Structures are given as C-alpha cells and as structure tokens.
Image (spheres, rainbow, N blue to C red):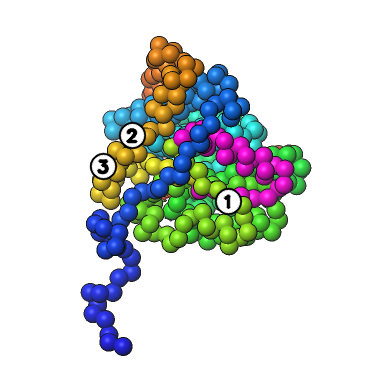
Amino acid sequence: MAKKATSDIRFAPTGMESPEKGGVQKGVDLPAATRKKHKSLGLTAQQLKDMYHQMYLQRRFEERAMQQYQKGKFGGFLHLYIGQEAISTGTVFAFNNDDDIITAYRDHGWGLCRGISANEGMAELFGKATGCSGGKGGSMHFANVKEHFWGGYGIVGGHIPIASGLAFANKYNANGRISACFFGDGAVDQGALHETMNLAQLWKLPTIFVVENNGYSMGTAAKRHTVAEIVDRAKGYGKKSAVINGMDVFSVYEKMKEIADDVREHSEPWFVEIRTYRYRGHSMSDPQKYRTKEELEEYQNIDPIERLKSYLVAEKVCNEAEISSIEESIEDEVLAAVTFADESPFPDQSELYTDMFVEDNPYFHV
Ligand SMILES: Cc1ncc(C[n+]2csc(CCOP(=O)(O)OP(=O)(O)O)c2C)c(N)n1
Ligand SMILES: [Mg+2]
C-alpha cells in the first residue's frame, strides 16, 4: 500500500464547512417536545407560575452575575447556565425534595432551584462569608446539603462516582430516595463515568446518569469530541435510557418524573441524554469562534423561558401584567442580592482550616 502523505493524515474532523469535509455540525438535534398540556401532566396553575419564577430567577441572577464579573467585583471562573434552565427546573419539579442532586461546575441554576437564595448565591460568587459555601467555594462550588443539593464540582466527571455513592447510601438505608448526577457531553468519555455505570448496574443502584448535552465541550463540538450517539452508551451497560428535549420544561418534567418513579420502584439506574444549548461562552473568556451567530439564534428563537411565557398567556394561566409583576419582583431580588454581596464581609482568616472534613454525622450513618 502506498504511503500516505503526512498532509493527508487526519486525526479529527476539522473546519467549519460542510460535514462531508469533516466540518462542525450543528450543536444538537432536539427530539420533539411533549404535546401534553399542564393539566394532563398533573401541574397546577400555581406550579406553572412557580416554574416561570424559578426559570426567570436563574436567568436574571446569571445576567447580573455576568455584569458584576465584568465590573471586576469578583474573579476566577464563571460558567453560565443561560439557555439550560428548563433542565434544572423541570427536574426539580419532577423529583421529591429529598432526592439527591449533584452537578458539575455550571451549577448556579441548580443551586437556586434547591433552596440557595439569590443573596447566598451572589455572595458566594463574590467570595463573601454570607455565601452558600461560606465564600470559600465560589462559582463552581454552590451547595446546599440540607436540601439535598451536593454541588458544584470542577473536575469533569469527578462527581459521577459520588452520585452513585449517594444512591448506594439511599438503597442501604432503604429510605426511598433516589439520586441523579448531571454532567456535560464533555464527560461522557471519562473513565469515572464508565466505571460507575458498570457498578451502578451490577448493584442496581437507584440513580440517574444525566448528560446535559449542550453541543460543546469548551470550544469543541460534541460531534468532534465523541463518537456515536451519546445515549447509546446506555446499551453497553444494559441500562434503560431516554433522550429529552431540554429546551422545553414540560418535556423535562414529564420524562424525568416517569424515570424517577421507575427508579424508585425498581431500584435500577437510567442513562438519560437531555439535549440543550448554552447561549453564553464556556466561561467568561471565550471568543466563541467555534460556532456561528446563526446557530446561536436558532436556539434563542426557541428559548425555554419565552416558550413557557407564551404558554402561560395563551392558556390564560397568567396575563401580561402578572408576568411583569413576577419579573419585576425577581429584578428587585437580584439587585438586592448584588448589594447584599457587596456589603457582606469576606470570610475571617480563622475560616481557612474549617470545613475541610466531615467531622460528625457522616451522611452514610444518618
Ligand atoms: C478532568 C478534567 N479535564 C479537563 C478539565 C477542563 N475543562 C473544564 S470544563 C471542560 C469542558 C466540559 O464540557 P462539558 O462536559 O460538555 O460541560 P459544559 O461546559 O458544556 O457544561 C473541560 C475540558 C477539567 N475541569 N477536568
Ligand atoms: Mg457541553
């Protein structure tokens, strides 16, 4: 066989042109959204308003956080969840309040859904003592263990075994709770995922592995960093699986509720791919050269918050004035959070060595 010229040897698709030439394809293909209306999903009008409140709070909290970052009020990393809010919201509404949730570093929205106030969240970003992690965690380490939100992790895939550990404890204690681990498409080829998927299946742990596939791992499109359909990873481990439209809160709610019920009943893990899109860069210093403006607009046109708002108005759950009043109250809440964070003190030096270890009542023995 003739030796290939070095210039013909390729290790990965390149370029932004056509897929045949190895170009980058569109972020994610969304499956159809549910056609069900709220009543047939068992959601009340009040719950819909709460959902809207929750999603809008996450959006405005992060928009303000971004502004404060740009003003230099805090530094380090800031990974925004904007665009993905239907996933946290739909899931938290579908789960019981004491089901365990753990996520990666794109964690602000999850924290706000699980009892962290705007004040505590903003103060954490500012590194202040009044923050949800005492100002010692920052953006990537929001946590609220009392409300079964276990954080906030910076190592891609590193938190996946912890989620199954939580499931192990729940099964051992026979407390009827389940756990769910949320991670990005960039984590699907991490060894920790595959080791944990194997054990979770062997031990029939009540847990859900959830990929929030937003189409990109930093600046690399999913179609350039991973082979095959992500959801098909489930097959190799004999897992039940689903693909969900993450731009629609009803679809997330419906399917995650069904899955949670199944996991609770049969104590068997699921592997779920929720397809979504992040509107902002990976973190704050991302020139976003890997995607086109048109692609971004395609997803912004099906924004999950706008979608819910249109539904609320069309179904006469709220009128425009009620929606404005929800939005205004959130605006005030988030602005007050900025002032709160600004005026709060930094942690005392004596805090440097606290919160390093669990000293009493480890979770497993509760
Ligand atoms: C083990 C490890 N390798 C590399 C990194 C650097 N890193 C931080 S985020 C990231 C991309 C992860 O993308 P994805 O899982 O799709 O999550 P998303 O940012 O899209 O939410 C990488 C490679 C890291 N934090 N941990
Ligand atoms: Mg991603």
* Residue 151 percent across, percent down from the top left: 53, 40
Q: Which mark is residue 206?
A: none
* Residue 94 percent across, percent down from the top left: 59, 33
The disc, 2 or 3, on the residue closer to the chain's N-terminal end is 3
Task: Residue at 49%, 59% (x, y): give it.
Answer: 190
Q: As drawn, which residue projects farthest toward the top?
A: 321
Mark 3 Cα-neighbour bin, 10 Å: few <14, some 14–19, many ≥20: few
The disc, 1 or 2, on the residue closer to the chain's N-terminal end is 1
For label 1, the residue is 241
Magenta stretch secondary structure, dominant: helix
For label 3, the residue is 294
* Residue 347 percent across, percent down from the top left: 47, 31
In the structure shown, which secondary structural element does the residue marked by tag 1 occupy? Answer: strand
Name above or below for residue 207 compared with residue 332.
below
In the structure shown, which secondary structural element does the residue marked by tag 3 occupy? Answer: helix
Q: CA distance from mark 1 to mark 2?
A: 28 Å
Chain part drawn in magenta = 248-273
For label 2, the residue is 301
* Residue 208 percent across, percent down from the top left: 60, 47
The disc, 3 or 1, on the residue closer to the chain's N-terminal end is 1
Q: CA distance from mark 3 to mark 1?
A: 31 Å
In the drawing, does residue 208 fall left or right of residue 157?
right
Q: Residue 221 versus residue 261: which sits nearer the camera?
A: 261
Q: CA distance from mark 2 to mark 3?
A: 10 Å
Task: Residue at 72%, 47% (x, y): give it.
Answer: 266
Which quadrant does the N terminus fall into?
bottom left
